[in-house]
Image (cartoon, rainbow, N blue to C red):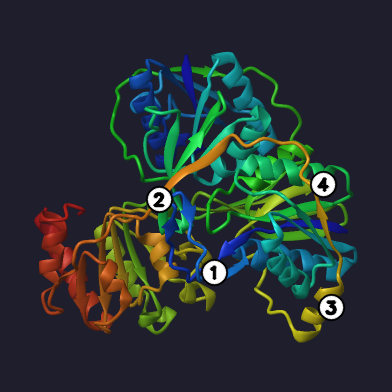
Amino acid sequence: MSIVVFVSNTKGKINKAGLEAICYAADIAKNSGDSVTAVTAGSLEGDGGAGAYGASKLISCASVNHSDSVQVTNMVSAVISDEGASMIITSHDNDGKQVAPRLAARLNCGMVTGVTGLPDTSAGFTVKKNVFSGKAIAQVSITSDKKILALLPNSHGLHEHGVTAEVSEWSGDAGAASVTVKEVKVEESNVVPLPEAELVVSAGRGMKGPENWGMIEELASELGATTACSRPVSDIGWRPHHEHVGQTGVAIRPNLYIAIGISGAIQHLAGVNGSKKIVVVNTDSEAPFFKAADYGIVGDAFEVVPKLIAAAKAFNASK
Amino acid sequence: MNILVCISKTPDTTSKIAFTDGGTKFDENGIQFIVNPYDEWYALVRALELKEASGGKVTVISVGDASNDPIIRKSLAIGADEAVRIDAADTDALFVAQQIANYAKENDYNMILTGKETINYNGGQLGGMIAELVGLPYVAMATKLDLDGDTATIEREIQGGSEVLEVNGGFVLSAAKGMAEQRIPNMRGIMAARSKPLTVIAPSGGEAHTSVVNYELPPAKAECKYIDAENAEELIALLHNEAKVI
Protein backbone atom coordinates (compact mmCIF):
# COMPACT_ATOMS: atom_id res chain seq x y z
CA MET A 1 0.00 0.00 0.00
CA SER A 2 1.06 3.54 -0.28
CA ILE A 3 0.89 6.66 1.82
CA VAL A 4 -0.37 9.61 -0.21
CA VAL A 5 1.21 13.01 0.46
CA PHE A 6 -0.36 16.19 -0.91
CA VAL A 7 2.28 18.89 -1.40
CA SER A 8 2.17 22.41 -2.77
CA ASN A 9 4.68 23.79 -5.22
CA THR A 10 5.92 27.16 -6.37
CA LYS A 11 7.44 27.71 -9.79
CA GLY A 12 8.08 24.04 -10.44
CA LYS A 13 9.56 23.22 -7.04
CA ILE A 14 7.94 21.58 -4.04
CA ASN A 15 8.18 23.96 -1.08
CA LYS A 16 10.27 23.04 1.94
CA ALA A 17 7.22 22.24 4.09
CA GLY A 18 6.04 19.85 1.35
CA LEU A 19 9.41 18.07 1.19
CA GLU A 20 9.30 17.75 4.98
CA ALA A 21 5.83 16.16 4.70
CA ILE A 22 7.22 13.65 2.16
CA CYS A 23 10.16 12.88 4.47
CA TYR A 24 7.73 12.40 7.40
CA ALA A 25 5.59 10.04 5.30
CA ALA A 26 8.71 8.12 4.23
CA ASP A 27 9.68 7.63 7.88
CA ILE A 28 6.20 6.21 8.63
CA ALA A 29 6.40 4.05 5.49
CA LYS A 30 9.78 2.68 6.53
CA ASN A 31 8.18 1.10 9.61
CA SER A 32 4.98 -0.06 7.96
CA GLY A 33 6.52 -1.35 4.73
CA ASP A 34 4.49 1.06 2.60
CA SER A 35 5.64 3.29 -0.26
CA VAL A 36 5.08 7.04 -0.62
CA THR A 37 3.14 8.67 -3.45
CA ALA A 38 3.32 12.45 -3.64
CA VAL A 39 0.65 14.43 -5.46
CA THR A 40 0.67 18.10 -6.41
CA ALA A 41 -1.43 20.55 -8.41
CA GLY A 42 0.34 22.33 -11.25
CA SER A 43 3.49 21.19 -13.03
CA LEU A 44 6.95 20.46 -11.66
CA GLU A 45 10.49 20.47 -12.97
CA GLY A 46 11.38 16.76 -12.91
CA ASP A 47 10.22 15.25 -9.63
CA GLY A 48 10.48 18.59 -7.79
CA GLY A 49 12.75 17.00 -5.16
CA ALA A 50 10.12 14.40 -4.12
CA GLY A 51 12.36 11.36 -4.73
CA ALA A 52 15.29 12.55 -2.65
CA TYR A 53 13.04 12.83 0.41
CA GLY A 54 11.35 9.48 -0.04
CA ALA A 55 8.53 9.48 -2.63
CA SER A 56 8.66 6.60 -5.10
CA LYS A 57 5.89 8.14 -7.21
CA LEU A 58 5.09 11.72 -8.03
CA ILE A 59 1.76 12.57 -9.63
CA SER A 60 1.15 16.10 -10.86
CA CYS A 61 -1.46 17.74 -13.01
CA ALA A 62 -0.73 20.93 -14.92
CA SER A 63 -4.41 21.78 -15.43
CA VAL A 64 -5.41 21.64 -11.75
CA ASN A 65 -5.31 25.01 -9.98
CA HIS A 66 -3.66 24.75 -6.53
CA SER A 67 -5.96 27.53 -5.25
CA ASP A 68 -9.11 25.61 -6.13
CA SER A 69 -9.95 23.43 -3.13
CA VAL A 70 -12.65 21.57 -5.07
CA GLN A 71 -10.43 20.62 -8.01
CA VAL A 72 -7.51 19.66 -5.77
CA THR A 73 -9.77 17.55 -3.53
CA ASN A 74 -11.17 15.79 -6.60
CA MET A 75 -7.66 14.98 -7.80
CA VAL A 76 -6.22 13.92 -4.43
CA SER A 77 -9.21 11.76 -3.52
CA ALA A 78 -8.98 10.01 -6.92
CA VAL A 79 -5.27 9.31 -6.30
CA ILE A 80 -6.05 8.01 -2.78
CA SER A 81 -8.61 5.65 -4.27
CA ASP A 82 -6.26 4.49 -7.10
CA GLU A 83 -3.46 3.86 -4.62
CA GLY A 84 -5.73 2.23 -2.05
CA ALA A 85 -4.18 4.51 0.54
CA SER A 86 -5.48 4.80 4.08
CA MET A 87 -2.86 7.24 5.36
CA ILE A 88 -2.84 10.74 3.91
CA ILE A 89 -0.23 13.35 4.83
CA THR A 90 -0.10 17.08 4.03
CA SER A 91 1.87 19.97 5.36
CA HIS A 92 -0.11 22.31 7.62
CA ASP A 93 0.77 25.14 5.20
CA ASN A 94 -1.59 27.49 3.37
CA ASP A 95 -2.55 25.05 0.60
CA GLY A 96 -2.72 22.10 2.98
CA LYS A 97 -5.08 24.09 5.22
CA GLN A 98 -7.37 24.69 2.25
CA VAL A 99 -7.44 21.14 0.93
CA ALA A 100 -7.02 18.71 3.85
CA PRO A 101 -10.25 19.52 5.78
CA ARG A 102 -12.26 19.22 2.57
CA LEU A 103 -10.64 15.85 1.96
CA ALA A 104 -11.41 14.66 5.52
CA ALA A 105 -15.08 15.51 5.04
CA ARG A 106 -15.09 13.80 1.62
CA LEU A 107 -13.53 10.62 3.05
CA ASN A 108 -15.47 10.90 6.33
CA CYS A 109 -12.28 10.24 8.27
CA GLY A 110 -10.37 11.53 11.28
CA MET A 111 -7.83 14.27 10.79
CA VAL A 112 -5.25 15.92 13.03
CA THR A 113 -3.60 19.20 12.04
CA GLY A 114 -0.42 20.77 13.38
CA VAL A 115 1.09 17.33 14.03
CA THR A 116 4.55 17.52 15.64
CA GLY A 117 5.77 13.92 15.72
CA LEU A 118 5.52 10.43 14.24
CA PRO A 119 2.39 8.41 15.09
CA ASP A 120 2.39 6.02 18.06
CA THR A 121 0.71 2.72 17.19
CA SER A 122 1.47 0.89 20.45
CA ALA A 123 -2.16 1.23 21.57
CA GLY A 124 -4.48 2.25 18.76
CA PHE A 125 -3.25 5.19 16.70
CA THR A 126 -2.24 8.48 18.30
CA VAL A 127 -0.21 11.52 17.26
CA LYS A 128 0.96 14.59 19.11
CA LYS A 129 -0.07 18.06 18.08
CA ASN A 130 0.41 21.57 19.42
CA VAL A 131 -2.62 23.03 21.16
CA PHE A 132 -3.36 26.31 22.94
CA SER A 133 -1.13 27.97 20.33
CA GLY A 134 1.97 26.16 21.55
CA LYS A 135 1.24 26.47 25.28
CA ALA A 136 0.53 22.72 25.44
CA ILE A 137 0.75 19.46 23.52
CA ALA A 138 -2.15 17.05 23.01
CA GLN A 139 -1.99 13.38 22.18
CA VAL A 140 -4.89 12.73 19.82
CA SER A 141 -6.34 9.36 18.88
CA ILE A 142 -7.81 8.65 15.43
CA THR A 143 -10.24 5.75 15.18
CA SER A 144 -11.28 5.80 11.50
CA ASP A 145 -9.56 3.48 8.98
CA LYS A 146 -8.49 6.37 6.81
CA LYS A 147 -6.44 9.03 8.55
CA ILE A 148 -5.22 12.48 7.55
CA LEU A 149 -2.24 14.08 9.29
CA ALA A 150 -1.23 17.69 8.58
CA LEU A 151 2.36 18.19 9.70
CA LEU A 152 3.39 21.43 11.40
CA PRO A 153 6.26 22.92 9.33
CA ASN A 154 9.75 22.59 10.93
CA SER A 155 8.62 19.91 13.36
CA HIS A 156 10.04 16.78 11.68
CA GLY A 157 13.07 18.09 9.82
CA LEU A 158 14.46 17.05 6.46
CA HIS A 159 16.69 14.11 5.76
CA GLU A 160 17.24 12.37 2.46
CA HIS A 161 15.81 8.95 1.68
CA GLY A 162 17.32 8.81 -1.80
CA VAL A 163 14.44 7.13 -3.63
CA THR A 164 13.85 7.58 -7.35
CA ALA A 165 10.41 8.97 -8.03
CA GLU A 166 8.49 7.77 -11.05
CA VAL A 167 6.86 10.93 -12.41
CA SER A 168 3.44 10.86 -14.07
CA GLU A 169 0.75 13.28 -15.15
CA TRP A 170 -2.68 12.71 -13.64
CA SER A 171 -5.21 12.15 -16.42
CA GLY A 172 -8.45 12.25 -14.44
CA ASP A 173 -11.13 14.94 -14.52
CA ALA A 174 -10.85 17.51 -11.72
CA GLY A 175 -14.19 19.07 -12.65
CA ALA A 176 -15.19 22.70 -13.24
CA ALA A 177 -13.29 25.55 -11.58
CA SER A 178 -14.87 26.74 -8.31
CA VAL A 179 -12.74 29.91 -8.06
CA THR A 180 -10.92 32.17 -10.53
CA VAL A 181 -7.48 33.55 -9.76
CA LYS A 182 -7.44 37.28 -10.55
CA GLU A 183 -4.05 38.28 -9.25
CA VAL A 184 -1.03 36.76 -7.51
CA LYS A 185 1.04 39.09 -5.33
CA VAL A 186 4.26 37.32 -4.44
CA GLU A 187 7.33 39.45 -3.97
CA GLU A 188 10.47 38.11 -5.59
CA SER A 189 12.65 37.34 -2.63
CA ASN A 190 15.38 34.99 -1.53
CA VAL A 191 14.14 35.11 2.03
CA VAL A 192 12.60 31.90 3.40
CA PRO A 193 8.88 32.37 4.26
CA LEU A 194 8.35 32.81 8.02
CA PRO A 195 6.55 29.51 8.78
CA GLU A 196 9.42 27.54 7.18
CA ALA A 197 12.32 29.70 8.38
CA GLU A 198 15.02 28.07 10.52
CA LEU A 199 16.44 31.39 11.67
CA VAL A 200 14.22 34.32 12.65
CA VAL A 201 15.08 37.84 13.83
CA SER A 202 12.05 39.47 15.42
CA ALA A 203 11.57 42.92 16.92
CA GLY A 204 8.98 44.75 18.94
CA ARG A 205 7.95 48.15 20.23
CA GLY A 206 11.41 48.61 21.72
CA MET A 207 12.52 49.65 18.22
CA LYS A 208 10.52 52.90 18.71
CA GLY A 209 9.47 53.28 15.06
CA PRO A 210 9.39 51.63 11.62
CA GLU A 211 12.29 53.80 10.45
CA ASN A 212 14.58 51.84 12.80
CA TRP A 213 13.96 48.44 11.18
CA GLY A 214 16.97 48.82 8.89
CA MET A 215 19.27 47.31 11.52
CA ILE A 216 16.86 44.41 12.15
CA GLU A 217 16.80 43.64 8.43
CA GLU A 218 20.57 43.94 8.24
CA LEU A 219 21.09 41.53 11.14
CA ALA A 220 18.60 39.09 9.58
CA SER A 221 20.35 39.34 6.25
CA GLU A 222 23.78 38.69 7.79
CA LEU A 223 22.44 35.58 9.54
CA GLY A 224 20.34 34.42 6.57
CA ALA A 225 17.27 34.83 8.76
CA THR A 226 13.67 35.88 8.11
CA THR A 227 12.25 38.94 9.92
CA ALA A 228 9.23 38.84 12.20
CA CYS A 229 7.54 41.15 14.71
CA SER A 230 5.28 41.33 17.75
CA ARG A 231 1.55 42.03 17.57
CA PRO A 232 1.60 45.72 18.64
CA VAL A 233 4.10 46.43 15.87
CA SER A 234 1.90 44.94 13.14
CA ASP A 235 -1.24 46.49 14.69
CA ILE A 236 0.18 50.01 14.45
CA GLY A 237 1.31 49.27 10.92
CA TRP A 238 5.08 49.45 11.43
CA ARG A 239 5.40 46.00 9.85
CA PRO A 240 3.10 43.88 7.63
CA HIS A 241 0.54 41.54 9.26
CA HIS A 242 2.19 38.40 7.88
CA GLU A 243 5.26 39.10 10.06
CA HIS A 244 3.23 38.98 13.29
CA VAL A 245 4.17 35.93 15.38
CA GLY A 246 2.22 34.97 18.47
CA GLN A 247 -1.02 33.45 19.60
CA THR A 248 -3.15 35.37 17.11
CA GLY A 249 -0.47 35.59 14.43
CA VAL A 250 1.81 32.91 13.01
CA ALA A 251 3.10 30.16 15.32
CA ILE A 252 6.64 29.23 14.34
CA ARG A 253 9.31 26.77 15.47
CA PRO A 254 12.64 27.85 14.00
CA ASN A 255 16.04 26.62 15.21
CA LEU A 256 16.84 30.13 16.38
CA TYR A 257 14.51 32.96 17.39
CA ILE A 258 16.13 36.28 18.24
CA ALA A 259 13.71 38.67 19.97
CA ILE A 260 14.76 42.30 20.12
CA GLY A 261 12.80 44.84 22.14
CA ILE A 262 9.93 42.40 22.79
CA SER A 263 8.88 42.04 26.44
CA GLY A 264 7.49 38.52 25.98
CA ALA A 265 3.78 38.68 26.80
CA ILE A 266 2.21 35.23 27.20
CA GLN A 267 0.43 35.63 23.84
CA HIS A 268 3.73 36.26 22.07
CA LEU A 269 5.51 33.38 23.82
CA ALA A 270 2.74 31.02 22.73
CA GLY A 271 3.69 31.56 19.09
CA VAL A 272 7.44 31.06 19.51
CA ASN A 273 8.06 28.67 22.39
CA GLY A 274 8.51 25.79 19.96
CA SER A 275 11.77 27.47 18.85
CA LYS A 276 14.83 25.34 19.59
CA LYS A 277 16.92 28.27 20.86
CA ILE A 278 15.69 31.71 21.91
CA VAL A 279 17.84 34.83 22.27
CA VAL A 280 16.35 37.86 24.00
CA VAL A 281 17.71 41.40 23.82
CA ASN A 282 15.88 43.85 26.08
CA THR A 283 16.70 46.94 28.14
CA ASP A 284 14.49 45.68 30.97
CA SER A 285 16.21 42.90 32.91
CA GLU A 286 12.79 42.02 34.38
CA ALA A 287 11.21 41.42 30.93
CA PRO A 288 9.28 38.09 31.14
CA PHE A 289 10.85 36.93 27.87
CA PHE A 290 14.17 36.23 29.66
CA LYS A 291 12.45 33.35 31.52
CA ALA A 292 11.83 31.64 28.16
CA ALA A 293 15.25 32.50 26.73
CA ASP A 294 18.35 30.35 26.27
CA TYR A 295 20.60 33.39 25.87
CA GLY A 296 19.93 36.93 27.02
CA ILE A 297 21.51 40.33 26.63
CA VAL A 298 20.28 43.12 28.89
CA GLY A 299 20.89 46.25 26.89
CA ASP A 300 19.60 48.85 24.49
CA ALA A 301 18.76 47.46 21.04
CA PHE A 302 20.25 50.55 19.42
CA GLU A 303 23.63 49.70 20.93
CA VAL A 304 23.47 45.89 20.94
CA VAL A 305 22.12 45.25 17.42
CA PRO A 306 24.93 47.12 15.58
CA LYS A 307 27.43 45.09 17.61
CA LEU A 308 25.61 41.87 16.70
CA ILE A 309 25.68 42.88 13.03
CA ALA A 310 29.43 43.49 13.23
CA ALA A 311 29.94 40.15 15.01
CA ALA A 312 27.80 38.32 12.46
CA LYS A 313 29.79 39.93 9.63
CA ALA A 314 33.06 38.83 11.24
CA PHE A 315 31.64 35.32 11.74
CA ASN A 316 30.55 35.12 8.08
CA ALA A 317 33.98 36.34 6.95
CA SER A 318 35.68 33.62 9.02
CA LYS A 319 33.56 30.78 7.57
CA MET B 1 -27.52 38.97 2.08
CA ASN B 2 -27.75 36.30 4.78
CA ILE B 3 -24.49 35.37 6.44
CA LEU B 4 -23.79 32.49 8.81
CA VAL B 5 -20.80 33.03 11.13
CA CYS B 6 -19.41 30.09 13.11
CA ILE B 7 -18.16 31.02 16.57
CA SER B 8 -16.26 28.99 19.11
CA LYS B 9 -15.63 29.45 22.84
CA THR B 10 -11.93 29.68 23.75
CA PRO B 11 -9.93 30.65 26.84
CA ASP B 12 -8.81 34.28 26.94
CA THR B 13 -5.43 34.82 25.28
CA THR B 14 -3.75 35.65 28.62
CA SER B 15 -4.83 32.32 30.18
CA LYS B 16 -2.32 30.14 31.97
CA ILE B 17 -2.88 26.65 30.63
CA ALA B 18 -3.17 23.73 33.06
CA PHE B 19 -4.77 20.29 33.05
CA THR B 20 -6.57 18.10 35.61
CA ASP B 21 -7.63 14.45 35.92
CA GLY B 22 -4.19 13.09 35.10
CA GLY B 23 -3.68 15.42 32.16
CA THR B 24 -6.88 14.40 30.41
CA LYS B 25 -8.98 17.54 31.01
CA PHE B 26 -8.38 21.24 30.50
CA ASP B 27 -8.45 23.02 33.86
CA GLU B 28 -11.20 25.65 33.57
CA ASN B 29 -10.52 26.97 37.05
CA GLY B 30 -10.13 30.76 36.91
CA ILE B 31 -10.32 30.80 33.11
CA GLN B 32 -12.13 33.64 31.38
CA PHE B 33 -13.78 32.44 28.16
CA ILE B 34 -14.06 34.61 25.06
CA VAL B 35 -15.29 34.36 21.49
CA ASN B 36 -12.39 32.85 19.52
CA PRO B 37 -10.58 35.99 18.29
CA TYR B 38 -10.43 34.96 14.60
CA ASP B 39 -14.18 34.24 14.65
CA GLU B 40 -15.03 37.53 16.34
CA TRP B 41 -12.53 40.14 15.17
CA TYR B 42 -12.42 39.09 11.55
CA ALA B 43 -15.30 36.81 10.47
CA LEU B 44 -18.11 38.33 12.53
CA VAL B 45 -17.10 41.98 12.14
CA ARG B 46 -16.67 41.65 8.34
CA ALA B 47 -20.08 39.95 8.13
CA LEU B 48 -21.62 42.88 10.02
CA GLU B 49 -19.93 45.40 7.72
CA LEU B 50 -21.30 43.62 4.64
CA LYS B 51 -24.79 43.50 6.15
CA GLU B 52 -24.64 47.18 7.05
CA ALA B 53 -23.69 47.99 3.43
CA SER B 54 -26.27 45.85 1.65
CA GLY B 55 -28.91 44.65 4.14
CA GLY B 56 -29.80 41.12 5.19
CA LYS B 57 -29.05 39.34 8.44
CA VAL B 58 -26.12 37.85 10.29
CA THR B 59 -26.65 34.60 12.20
CA VAL B 60 -24.02 33.27 14.59
CA ILE B 61 -23.87 29.53 15.19
CA SER B 62 -21.98 27.69 17.89
CA VAL B 63 -21.74 24.05 18.91
CA GLY B 64 -21.56 23.54 22.68
CA ASP B 65 -23.51 23.41 25.90
CA ALA B 66 -25.16 26.30 27.77
CA SER B 67 -21.74 27.54 28.91
CA ASN B 68 -21.40 28.93 25.36
CA ASP B 69 -24.32 31.32 25.89
CA PRO B 70 -22.25 34.23 27.26
CA ILE B 71 -20.00 34.30 24.18
CA ILE B 72 -23.06 33.98 21.96
CA ARG B 73 -24.66 36.98 23.74
CA LYS B 74 -21.41 38.90 23.23
CA SER B 75 -21.64 38.24 19.47
CA LEU B 76 -25.23 39.48 19.50
CA ALA B 77 -24.10 42.56 21.44
CA ILE B 78 -21.49 43.29 18.77
CA GLY B 79 -24.31 43.26 16.21
CA ALA B 80 -25.34 39.77 15.03
CA ASP B 81 -29.11 39.54 14.51
CA GLU B 82 -29.80 36.05 15.79
CA ALA B 83 -28.02 33.02 17.17
CA VAL B 84 -28.23 29.25 17.01
CA ARG B 85 -26.60 26.90 19.49
CA ILE B 86 -26.35 23.20 18.72
CA ASP B 87 -26.42 21.45 22.06
CA ALA B 88 -23.49 19.02 21.80
CA ALA B 89 -19.87 18.78 22.90
CA ASP B 90 -17.48 20.27 20.34
CA THR B 91 -14.74 17.66 20.61
CA ASP B 92 -14.13 16.68 16.98
CA ALA B 93 -13.97 19.09 14.03
CA LEU B 94 -15.77 16.85 11.56
CA PHE B 95 -18.61 16.23 14.02
CA VAL B 96 -18.96 19.99 14.55
CA ALA B 97 -18.82 20.62 10.79
CA GLN B 98 -21.57 18.05 10.22
CA GLN B 99 -23.82 19.79 12.76
CA ILE B 100 -23.30 23.21 11.19
CA ALA B 101 -23.58 21.89 7.61
CA ASN B 102 -26.87 20.17 8.43
CA TYR B 103 -28.24 23.43 9.81
CA ALA B 104 -26.90 25.47 6.87
CA LYS B 105 -28.44 23.13 4.28
CA GLU B 106 -31.91 23.68 5.73
CA ASN B 107 -31.56 27.43 5.85
CA ASP B 108 -30.72 29.99 3.24
CA TYR B 109 -27.28 31.59 3.54
CA ASN B 110 -25.25 33.40 0.89
CA MET B 111 -22.00 32.69 2.67
CA ILE B 112 -20.57 30.92 5.72
CA LEU B 113 -17.63 32.51 7.56
CA THR B 114 -15.32 31.01 10.18
CA GLY B 115 -12.07 32.14 11.80
CA LYS B 116 -8.90 30.58 10.36
CA GLU B 117 -8.51 28.43 13.51
CA THR B 118 -9.42 28.46 17.19
CA ILE B 119 -6.73 29.52 19.62
CA ASN B 120 -7.28 26.46 21.84
CA TYR B 121 -7.19 23.47 19.47
CA ASN B 122 -5.53 25.26 16.52
CA GLY B 123 -7.29 22.88 14.13
CA GLY B 124 -8.21 25.14 11.22
CA GLN B 125 -10.45 22.42 9.81
CA LEU B 126 -14.02 23.60 10.26
CA GLY B 127 -14.47 25.86 7.21
CA GLY B 128 -13.11 23.37 4.68
CA MET B 129 -15.17 20.55 6.14
CA ILE B 130 -18.40 22.59 6.05
CA ALA B 131 -17.66 23.65 2.46
CA GLU B 132 -17.31 20.04 1.37
CA LEU B 133 -20.43 18.93 3.26
CA VAL B 134 -22.63 21.70 1.80
CA GLY B 135 -20.95 21.56 -1.63
CA LEU B 136 -19.57 25.10 -1.86
CA PRO B 137 -16.20 26.61 -2.86
CA TYR B 138 -13.81 27.23 0.04
CA VAL B 139 -11.14 29.87 0.56
CA ALA B 140 -8.80 29.48 3.56
CA MET B 141 -6.80 32.22 5.32
CA ALA B 142 -8.73 35.09 3.73
CA THR B 143 -7.58 38.62 4.58
CA LYS B 144 -10.06 40.61 2.44
CA LEU B 145 -13.62 40.05 1.30
CA ASP B 146 -15.58 42.36 -1.02
CA LEU B 147 -18.89 41.77 -2.75
CA ASP B 148 -20.26 43.03 -6.03
CA GLY B 149 -23.73 41.54 -6.49
CA ASP B 150 -23.29 37.79 -6.69
CA THR B 151 -19.52 37.92 -7.12
CA ALA B 152 -17.12 37.87 -4.18
CA THR B 153 -13.53 39.03 -4.44
CA ILE B 154 -11.39 37.37 -1.78
CA GLU B 155 -7.72 37.87 -1.01
CA ARG B 156 -5.97 35.03 0.76
CA GLU B 157 -2.51 34.36 2.15
CA ILE B 158 -0.31 32.06 0.08
CA GLN B 159 3.34 31.17 0.50
CA GLY B 160 5.39 34.35 0.31
CA GLY B 161 2.47 36.67 -0.44
CA SER B 162 -1.19 36.68 -1.33
CA GLU B 163 -3.57 36.01 -4.19
CA VAL B 164 -6.90 37.48 -5.22
CA LEU B 165 -9.67 35.02 -6.06
CA GLU B 166 -13.12 35.56 -7.51
CA VAL B 167 -16.04 33.34 -6.52
CA ASN B 168 -19.53 33.39 -7.99
CA GLY B 169 -22.47 32.48 -5.78
CA GLY B 170 -22.23 30.95 -2.31
CA PHE B 171 -18.96 30.12 -0.59
CA VAL B 172 -17.30 29.31 2.73
CA LEU B 173 -14.19 31.13 3.94
CA SER B 174 -11.89 31.16 6.94
CA ALA B 175 -10.87 34.64 8.06
CA ALA B 176 -7.36 35.75 9.04
CA LYS B 177 -5.97 39.02 10.33
CA GLY B 178 -6.59 42.03 8.08
CA MET B 179 -10.19 41.29 7.17
CA ALA B 180 -11.74 43.70 9.71
CA GLU B 181 -11.03 45.59 12.91
CA GLN B 182 -12.19 44.44 16.33
CA ARG B 183 -15.42 46.10 17.57
CA ILE B 184 -16.19 46.77 21.21
CA PRO B 185 -19.90 46.31 22.00
CA ASN B 186 -21.63 49.43 23.35
CA MET B 187 -24.30 49.57 26.06
CA ARG B 188 -27.12 49.74 23.51
CA GLY B 189 -25.78 46.61 21.82
CA ILE B 190 -25.47 44.79 25.12
CA MET B 191 -29.07 45.69 26.07
CA ALA B 192 -30.39 44.72 22.62
CA ALA B 193 -28.55 41.38 22.74
CA ARG B 194 -30.70 40.26 25.66
CA SER B 195 -33.84 40.19 23.52
CA LYS B 196 -32.34 38.85 20.28
CA PRO B 197 -33.33 35.25 19.45
CA LEU B 198 -31.00 32.43 20.59
CA THR B 199 -32.38 29.12 19.34
CA VAL B 200 -31.05 25.91 20.88
CA ILE B 201 -31.32 22.85 18.67
CA ALA B 202 -30.41 19.19 19.20
CA PRO B 203 -27.46 17.64 17.34
CA SER B 204 -28.28 15.73 14.15
CA GLY B 205 -26.20 12.65 13.36
CA GLY B 206 -22.48 12.85 12.78
CA GLU B 207 -19.73 10.87 14.44
CA ALA B 208 -16.35 11.79 15.93
CA HIS B 209 -13.26 10.03 14.58
CA THR B 210 -10.76 11.78 16.85
CA SER B 211 -10.40 12.36 20.59
CA VAL B 212 -7.75 13.80 22.88
CA VAL B 213 -6.10 11.06 24.96
CA ASN B 214 -4.10 13.41 27.15
CA TYR B 215 -2.36 16.76 27.38
CA GLU B 216 1.10 17.76 28.49
CA LEU B 217 2.91 21.03 28.97
CA PRO B 218 6.07 21.78 26.97
CA PRO B 219 9.30 20.85 28.81
CA ALA B 220 10.60 23.59 31.10
CA LYS B 221 13.39 25.76 29.73
CA ALA B 222 16.87 25.68 31.24
CA GLU B 223 18.16 28.87 32.88
CA CYS B 224 18.88 31.78 30.57
CA LYS B 225 22.59 32.37 29.97
CA TYR B 226 23.35 36.09 30.10
CA ILE B 227 25.94 37.70 27.87
CA ASP B 228 27.37 41.15 28.51
CA ALA B 229 25.96 43.79 26.15
CA GLU B 230 29.52 44.73 25.15
CA ASN B 231 30.36 41.16 24.03
CA ALA B 232 28.08 40.60 21.06
CA GLU B 233 30.68 38.36 19.40
CA GLU B 234 30.46 35.99 22.38
CA LEU B 235 26.76 35.45 21.61
CA ILE B 236 27.50 34.70 17.94
CA ALA B 237 30.21 32.24 19.05
CA LEU B 238 27.81 30.51 21.48
CA LEU B 239 25.13 30.23 18.80
CA HIS B 240 27.67 28.58 16.53
CA ASN B 241 29.67 26.37 18.93
CA GLU B 242 27.25 25.57 21.75
CA ALA B 243 23.73 25.92 20.34
CA LYS B 244 24.88 24.90 16.83
CA VAL B 245 22.10 26.89 15.19
CA ILE B 246 24.21 29.12 12.93
Q: Which mark is residue A32?
A: none
Q: CA distance from mark 4 to mark 3?
A: 25 Å
- Earlier-in-chain disc, 3 versus 2: 2
Tag 1: amino acid: Asp
The residue indicated by pointer 4 is B104
Q: CA distance from mark 3 to mark 2?
A: 43 Å
Q: Secondary structure at mark 3?
A: helix
Residue A111 falls in which quadrant of the image? top right
In contact (CB < 8 Å): disc 4 and disc 2: no
Crowd band around label 4 with a 10 angstrom C-alpha radius: few (<14), some (14–19), many (20+): some
The residue indicated by pointer 2 is B22
Pick the quarter of the image with the C terminus of chain B. Answer: bottom left
- Earlier-in-chain disc, 4 versus 1: 1
Do the residues at pointers 4 and 1 share their chain? yes
The residue indicated by pointer 1 is B12
Tag 2: amino acid: Gly
Q: Nearer the viewer, mark 4 or mark 1?
A: 1
Q: Nearer the viewer, mark 1 or mark 2?
A: 2
The answer to whether residue A193 of the structure is visible from this angle is: no
Q: Which mark is residue B192?
A: 3
In contact (CB < 8 Å): disc 1 and disc 2: no
Q: CA distance from mark 1 to mark 3?
A: 24 Å
